[in-house]
Structures are given as C-alpha cells and as structure tokens.
Image: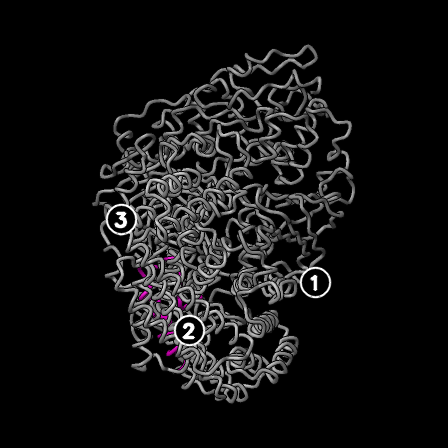
Amino acid sequence: MAGIGVAAEAAATPSIAPSLQPARSGSGQSVTEDATGILDAKIAFFEALVGFRAEGLTSDEQLQLAANQLAGLTGDDAALRIALYYGALAPPDRVAGFLMEERFDAIHDLVHLMDTRARTGQPEPGEHRRITARLVDFIGVARELLDQVPAAHGESLAARLAMRGLEQRWPGTHEEQNAEFRRQAEQAQSSASFAIRAFEGAGMATPQLEPEWVLARLALIDDDLAEAERCFRRMNTIASRSGHDAWRERALMGLVGVAHEHGSPIRASAALSELATFRSPQDCWGLAREVAVLRLGRDEAAEAILWLESHPPNPGIDREIEAVTAQDEWAALMAAAHLRADRPFQARLVLDTMASAEARDTSEESERRSLPLRVVLQLELGDPEGALATLEEPAAAALEAKDRHTLRGSAYLAAGRTTEAIAELEAALAAAAKRDVQDRRAVVDASAVGEWLGLSAVTDLAKAYLVGRHDALGAAAAIEAAHGSMTVEEARGRLLTLASSMDLGLITWIAGADTTLMIHVEASGRATHASLPMGRAAIARAIRRVRQGIIDTRDAPMSGRLNSQLNGLAAALLPAELGRQILAFANSHDEAPSLLLMPHGALERLPFEALPVGGPAGPLDESTVKATRRLGTDVSVAIVTKMRAAADMAPRVDLRKVRWTAVGAPDFQSLQGLDGAAKELSSLGRMNPRMSVLAGPRATRQALMQALGSGTPLHVSSHVVPVHRTAPGSDSPASGGAVPFGLAMSGDDVVTSDELAGTAPRLPLLVLAACASGDGDALDGGSVRGLAQVALDAGTRCTLLTQWPISDQSAYHASLTFHGALLAGSPPSEAARRARKLLRDTGRPMVEWSAYRLSGAW
Amino acid sequence: MDSNDSQLPRPSGLPNSSGSGSGSGSGLETLIRFDELSPAELAELKTTPSAARAIDLMESAEAYLESGGLAEASVSAEELYAYGLGPGASALESERQAAVKRHLSASPEESAWVEGLQAAPPSPLILDHDSNEEASEDQPALSAQAQPGKHLRAVASDAFATATAPSPTAAPPVPTQRPAPTGVNWMVWSPLAAAALVLAMALGGGARPSALDGALPDSPILRSSIELRLLFPRGRILSANAPSGAFAARPRFEITPSTEASLFRYELKRLDPIASMDAGSALFEAGESLWTVESKKRTITANPLETGAYEWTAWETINGVDRRLGTMTFQVVEDPAWNAATLQAEGATETVIRERVRQLHADGYLTDARNLVRALPTSSERSSYLTGQ
C-alpha cells in the first residue's frame, strides 16, 4: 500500500478515460500511444518516488525529471507537487514515513478482512475494537513524524470506521442527542479534517476522497446540507479528475440526496445526467432508482413503471448496492408508481410480494421502507383507521418526522378527525418551512415545501380547514403560509390586507394529487371555495394544451377547439360569481376592476390572462370571441405565487418621478436584429425624460449589471437565449443552473440568470420585454423558474414578464402602451391590462396580447 | 428550377416603407376602402389570406376607434394622421398641433402609430377590376408581379417594379405609379385615416421579405433564440381523405437534431376519443395512445391520420437515460378550400408550389406548407423555411 496513494495521485489526470484525450497537435502520436506513454510515465514516476523515499537510490533530480515528464504529458502538476513535498524532507524523515506507510498497509489489510467477514455473515467478536485500538496506536506514532502522510492515511481510516458506527445508529434512534454519539462524530470530523489538510500539504488530492466523504456524511447527520453539498462537490471534482468512478458515483449520488433534501429536482436531475456519462442505468441501481424517483415527482407514473420494469437492480454487477435493500427500493418505487397511476390493486400486489420477502428478512429497515406505501394504500382503499394503526407499528418510529406527520395528518383527515389532522400537517409544514428559510439565500432552485414535503400535504391541510372548521380563509392562509414560509395566522392577516386592496379581492389555488382547491377571498374578507376533482397531472395536461393552442394563434386564427378549452378551464377554475362581479363593477365604474391571482404548483403556468370571464364565450363566432371579456383585458390582474414581507422586497415608488433605465436592442452578430426593440427604446426615451436609454452598442453587460443593481426601475428589450446548465462538477457554488436562460447583450455577450441573481436586483419594477422571460421549469412551491422569478426572489417588487415567445413588433407596441399608462399614473397591473387590450383591440393574435403577465403585487 | 422562375421577382427585401413612397397609394387606398366594396368583392378580397388579415386588422381598428380609443379623445383620427405627416396630409394649425401633442403625450401607443405614418404605409394589394379571368396555376394569383384578371396580387414597390424585367409571356403589369392621393382624399373619410394608422401599426417597421414578394413565407422576428425540440406536426393539418400528397396521408414526425441522443421514442395519442365530449371537457383527459415507436432517427413516418385532435410526445435517450423532449398537439381538419389537386406537388411548377406554400402558410397550415416546400428544388430559401430561420 505504501506509495500507492501517492502514485494514484500523481497519475490522476491521465487515468481519465485515455481514449478521450485528443492527440496532441504536432506530436504525430495516436491516442493509444499517448495513453501508453502516460502509463509508462506513471510507472517511472512511481518507481522514482519509491527509490527516492525508501532507499535513496533515486536522486532529487531524477525524481524531478520523472515528475516533469508525467506533468508534461498530463498537463497536471500533481507529480511536481508531490516531488516538491518529499524533496523538502530530510532523507531520514522520508525513510521513516515510508516505513510507517508499510505499517499502515498491514492495518488496512486487517480492516479489509474484517469487512469481508462482516459481509459474509462471519464477523469475529471484538475484532472491530482490536483493530481500532491498533489504529489509534499507529496514529499516535505517525503524528510525531515530519512526514504527515502516514498519519493522514491513519486518520482517514479511523474516520471511516467511526462513521460506519455512527451511521448504524442513525437515523431514528435519537442517539444523535447522546453525548457519546456526539463525541464520536466530533472525533470522526477531526480525523477527516486532519487527513484532508495533510494530504493537501503533500500535494495529494485523490487520498482526500475518503475523508471528504466522511465529512459529507457527518454534515448530513448534522442536517447541514450546505456543508454536505460542498464536500460532495469537492469529491466529485477530485474523482472526476483522477478517474475514480466509484468515488465519483458516491459523490454524485450524495449530491442527488442533498438535492432531494433541499427539494430541488433540477439539481438532482443535473447530477444524474452527469452520473449517466460514466454509469449505465442497467448496471447502476442508484442511477436507475433516482431516474424513477424524478419521474414520479413529475407525475409521469406510467413512464416510471416502464422504466422500473426495464431497470431492476443488478447486484451481480453493481457493487455499490446491497441486494435486499435494492430489491426493497425497487418494489417500493414500483408500488408508488402504481398508486400514482391509479392502480391500487397492482400496488398491493407489489407490496404483498415485498411483505413476503420481509418475512424472510425481517429487518427493521425493510419494514420502514414499505410502511409509508402500506399507509398510502390503505388510505387509497378507504381504510384510514387501518392506516392509523399501521402508523403505530414500531417501524413507524424510524420514519422521518415530516413523513410521519404528513401520513398521520392525511389519515386523520380521511377519518374525519380534522383537529388532529391540522396539528399533524402544520407540524410537517413547519419542518419544511424551516428548511426553506434556511435555504433561501443558498439554494434558489429548491422548495422544501413543494418538493421535499409535497404540495399534497398543503392541499390536505387546506381541506382540513375547510372540512373541519368551515374556514375558507383559514384554508387560503394555510396554502399561502406554506408558500411564504410563515404561520397560518400571519398569512391570514396578510391575505385580508391584500384582498382589501383589490376591487375583486384575491383567488388562491392549489392542485393536490387528486383534488384542486380554489378559494376566493373578496375585498370584504368574505371567503368562498370550490373543489375540483382533478389532480395536478390532469391540470398540468390541460394547461399544456391550452398554452399550445394559444401559441398556435400566431399562425392561424383562434380555433373553436381553443375557444372551448378556454371556456372549460374558466368554468373549472374560476369562481362562478366572478363574472357577475366583473360585470357589476363595469356597470358602476369607469376603470377596470383589480384582482390578485395566487396560483400554485401546476397552476402557475395557466394563462389566466386569456381566460373568458362573465360567462362562457359560447361557440366560436368572430363577433362573440371579440366581445368576450377576458381576465387579461378586462381586469387589472396581478399574479403572486408567494407572499413576501415588505422587508423582503423593494419599496413602492412613484414610477412617474423616479429615474428609469432602459437597456436593449443589442448588437449581437448571430441573432436577428430587433428593430422593434430599438424603436421601442428610442420612443421610451422620448416619452419619459427620466429614462436613461442604453441601446445598440451601449447595451452592454456592464450597463445591464449596473442597472440591475441600481435599485431603480429597469426596462429590458432583448433576446432571451438558452444557456447550458452548469454541471455539478463545477466549482461554482450556485451552479445548479436552475434557469438555463440569459439575456443577449452587445458584443455577443450573454448575462446569465446566475449573473442576474448575483446582482441581487431589488428593483421596484422590472420589465422584461423579451421572449418567455417568465417561463422555465415549474418547481412545486417555488414558482416557474424563469428569469423574472430570479429577480422576484432577489427582492424585485414586480416584473412585467412574458409567458411564451413574443414578436418584436408587438412587444414594441405593448411596451409603449405599458409605459404610457404608468406615466399617466396607472399601477403596473392596470398598465399591463392596457397593453394587452391595445394589442387585442388592434387585431393582434391571442399569443401576442395574452403573453404579458404582471407578477408581484404593487 | 422551373422555367417560370425567371419571371419570379426575386425577394430583394421588402417593400420597405421608405422605398415604397406614396406611389403605392392606390393599393393602399383600395385596401383601406374595404367597406366601400360590394360583399362579393370583399369576400373575394378576403379569400387571399394576407388581404384577409389586413382587412381584419382594419375592421378591428374601426371597432376600436369607434368603441373606445380615439372616440374618447380630444383629437380626431384625421388630426392624428395630419400631425404624423402621413402621405398626402395637410399641415395642422398650430393650436390643433398643440392639442394633438398633448393628447399623444398621454397616449404613447397612438404616438407610436403616428411616428409610423411619417414613413409611408407599405403597398400591399390591388384589387384589379379590369378582367374576369381567373388565375391559372402557372400564373398564381398572389404574385409580386401584376397579373391580368380580377384577382389579387402584390403591388411591387417602385424600386422593385423597375428592377424586374417583365417576361415576354407575362401580362402587362398594372401601372404602379398612380397619382398620390391628395390630402383631401385622405381626410374626408375619417375611418380611412384610422385604417392608415392601423396599417402603419400592423405593417410598419418591417424590413423582411413577405409572402407578397414571391418569397417563401417568413415568421415574425421573435425576441428569443430558444427552440422547441418538437418541430412538426403542429397546429392545423389538412385531412388526408382525398389528396395522397397531403401531410396527413403520410405524416412525418420530426424533432430537432441531437448529437448526443442514441435513441428516440415517439408516442401518438388521440384526444377526444369520446365523441360526445367537447374540447373543454376532454381537455383534462389523458387521451388514447395509438402507437409508440422507438427509432434511431429524429424523424419517423407514420400511417395516415384521420380527422381529429392528436397529441404527440417525443423522448430522447442519452447515456441510457431517456428524457421527455416535449408534447405537442395538432388537429387534422377538413377544409373545403383545399382539395387533392391543390395539395399535389407532382406536376406542379415551382411557381405554383411556392404559391400554394404561401397560401397554406397564410391559412395556418404550417405543417402542410412545410411538407409541400420539400417538393421545391434545394435552395437556401427552402432550407431556411424548413429550419424556420
């Protein structure tokens, strides 16, 4: 073992898939020849190093030469740094270190034997204690040496052994509270940290993988997700460079786990994509399992079933898994997929099979894995009392607290015990809200409420308020509390304030697994509700079809089909009395009424602006369609997906009196010129003397970044361009790439969403007159992750965004109308209505006028 | 290339507003006097999609101007037009100029239209009353070059008309240099000025080829470079009942290329399988899967499609993991305006094919238009149309 870690480190880079290394220009060598040359150089360096350390047979110059040759071939200076480290040691210190590493190898072999016996069910009593004692002795001696590498190996192994003991008692036994548990954890952390420092000092990165892994696991036990993520990322970087695929797999699976804990399927997906570049889902159950998990999370149950059927665990090939555990996981996922596909009997069949397997292997872990599904199945089959009884089984104690609360809450709700349901579900929500508050700054593409806990828990809580307390306002407050990370009582007060500031109050929606709730809080504070027997999958399907129907109006007149679909959506999702209220308001007022819409989950992508109000539009007939009142043109609507405290956003300002900046119409060689945007900016500058216009060559990255950080209103007219998501291996701490878009700027430059977020734009109003500036991946509990949402998250008060691509010319007209209305004193939601109305009244297709959305309450 | 190709005006850019000048006033005048036409004339005018769209805009404008907009304003459409120095406009008195200026400062949208008037509106169409001849397939109705007969055609800009030498076989072009309308002509009829405003709004500012130039149709400039992965079919598609050349007779499912994908999967679902359900009720239903197919190609050809609504989904497999690329709906519809003959590329000249492509495109049958474009000889223009660039 002595020197193996060193050699592996020195040879790190070359061992990365040599076939991928391009032949060096001018060398005339083939890829294979290159790889052979690197291997020879590795061996030469290893032999030189051994000779230099152990016997003094190799001179410093010879070692340097070998290191230079290897570094020259690989482009990595690891060998040079190692040579430098050992060259700085006196010969006796080098020899002492070398001999200690031989002693370490013997201990390492003993650990390996112990592991083998444990795996084959033949553990030797007291063996672990004996080896640990020997290791402690070894570390004590090694720490005294000038060469700290042997001690680093010893500490690394000690940390791993300690970690194994800690994980066997965690989670669920509450021993993490135990002083001995804490002491061992701290010892493991100290050992791992020492090892990392010592290896780093010796220029060795690869041996840091094991202690980094220990630190990551310890961070997970401490619920310190940020630290765990940092460690896994570092592991991934080192393993990727050194070609240690097994460690890289562990690092990426660790990142997937952290992403789930944050509630970020976007990050989980990115890590899995990277894992798939070197692992096949046929041979890597972790990869196959997580792909299935993501599909279930996206309501793609049928696809998850197909995937699981063709990707069962393969313990014969996959050395990272334990056969029984993997089989349990497969069965649990399959049962969950059947349940989501509304096939409870197939789910029961799978669970029964799992139970019979448990009879042979009655491990607590196995029972814990199947228990949530048994509860859900019982609820699905109308047996809430049975579900509550199952939740009293000993295995339930090992459930994660949020799962225990959620399942109990759902079971109590189904049993009609709403008070207990509310208590349990609020406890689950509190745990998720706490996590969201912790993550708010660090993780922008996650929602613990939406993706870690799940919006079904929120839906159940709202139902409990409705059924048990007949409290529609409380139900609305429960929905908003979950999304705004606040208490239900806080949310109740804010909702009443918001509703009273709107002519028609506000409406909130939430789509659960099987039910969608709508609650209308009128300006007076009166709240009414309606329930739709459709889950989020059906809602998302309908919204997708309607959005496409609207987009198709760019090329063809509005179809009767789209007309019927919009009518269907409005009838299903808008309060029955809303149309009458709008008509009554119109009869008594000159201006349009204001209304706040608060959609959540799948509903956030619903094009509310196009929905008819005031009764169904009836069959498609040109005059009828034209005369139909629509939310976007007849009501001043604003959309809010998350209530925020006043301190969390820019203050309201008089938009007529403050300084504005307008940036856009950039010179970008490969993109079509935006004549409309150029005209738009020029006209805006003339309309508003307080507006500084930076167009054409002046629309630079610097100009945009400066404007984003200025705290004053900003108008951007440009192209939205795709940006590749950053791989998890990136060193960037915010490399989740939640919003893979950017804004085109002059000089063929692109300001990415991450850069936009980096300026922390806390603006009173941001107009993003660009294509689909509000569109992106939908994140339950975390809004649609578009460029506009990035600004809202940072504290921008309102944005005028677009839901899909818009034409340059229409945007020109919409922007001028919007700003004209602002200058006339209209609030942004009314200005947006006027812009939509103008486009609609002048014959622009629905795809143009209904694209504009005002997001955020003014 | 078809022999008629030499007669086709080359798309040398657009009837750019500054280049078209006021000489095209007759075309504009004809179009914007749409409500003076007989119902039959109007109906015929509307059979040409581009004209229909322009007329729709003007009808919308009328409605807008009469119902709200300018009706509530302190200035008239004529004054706005004059203030904007539209073609033939007379100068306003200083007092009225100030009034218009005040009005525009509060109405930036109108201000923008007025700005557009300073460049003359483009010259879209002429309704030629001189002949009753129908356009033949070889001499398509909608062409950039004037044709005899009572049909619609584009009026070339001045520069355009002089740059294109008439073919010996071509009918004499209608003079494009007509006397510019006088200020009185423009002013006496207020909806006329209003319509001009709308035309300026609807058509102004463009500098790209249009269907009226003889070029293949183009899409509007969008403020984005983001592509959808699913290309075609999409939108409305003509039924395959009669024409063997129709897209629906041999539908081709197409997604954007991928260098990483090793496999693609396609699924087609029939929506509204229950006839009694209307589209609003069926909106939430999953649909009935008709087929699923895996292929290494990014395009597949399927069996003929019956009339109805469909939804297709595509996945790509990268490194053994498949991921959904998207889902797109489309409808196969019956349209009496299109029949077997008009969708057949076989035996049709390039000119005819181009014309049909333009009409299909203008009617919203983008998938069929794209299908027909493939019958054209390879060219950068054809390629641009197929790639949507």
Q: Nearer the viewer, mark 3 or mark 2?
A: 3
Mark 2 neighbour class, 10 Å CA radius: few under 14, some 14 to 19, many 20 or more: few
Q: Nearer the viewer, mark 3 or mark 1?
A: 3
Name the kind of residue labelled 3 in the image: Ala
Does the stretch in magenta take in A434? yes
B338 or B265: nearer the viewer? B265
A684 or A225: nearer the viewer? A225
Looking at the rendered image, the quarter that the N terminus of chain A falls into is: bottom left
Residue denoted by label 2: A164
Residue at screen point 70% across, 62% down: B274
Q: Determine the chain carrying the residue at label 2.
A: A
* Label disc, if present, on residue B132 of the rendered structure: none
Residue denoted by label 3: A88
Residue denoted by label 1: B274
Cβ–Cβ under 8 Å for marks 3 and 2: no
A592 or A782: nearer the viewer? A782
Judge whether residue A462 can be spotted in this image.
Answer: yes
Name the kind of residue labelled 2 in the image: Arg
Identify the mark nearer the N-term, 3 or 2: 3
Decide if residue A370 is on the left or right side of residue A597. Answer: right
Magenta: main secondary structure equals helix
Residue at screen point 38% across, 42% down: A67
Residue at screen point 48% across, 64% down: A574
Name the kind of residue labelled 1 in the image: Ile
| Residue A833 coordinates in the image, percent (x, y) | 39, 50
Q: Is residue A771 above or below residue A268?
A: above
Q: Secondary structure at mark 3?
A: loop
Cβ–Cβ under 8 Å for marks 2 and 1: no
Question: In the rendered view, how is the structure colored?
Answer: one colour
- Which residues make up the magenta segment? A424-451
Looking at the rendered image, the quarter that the C terminus of chain A falls into is: bottom left
Do marks 3 and 2 share a chain?
yes
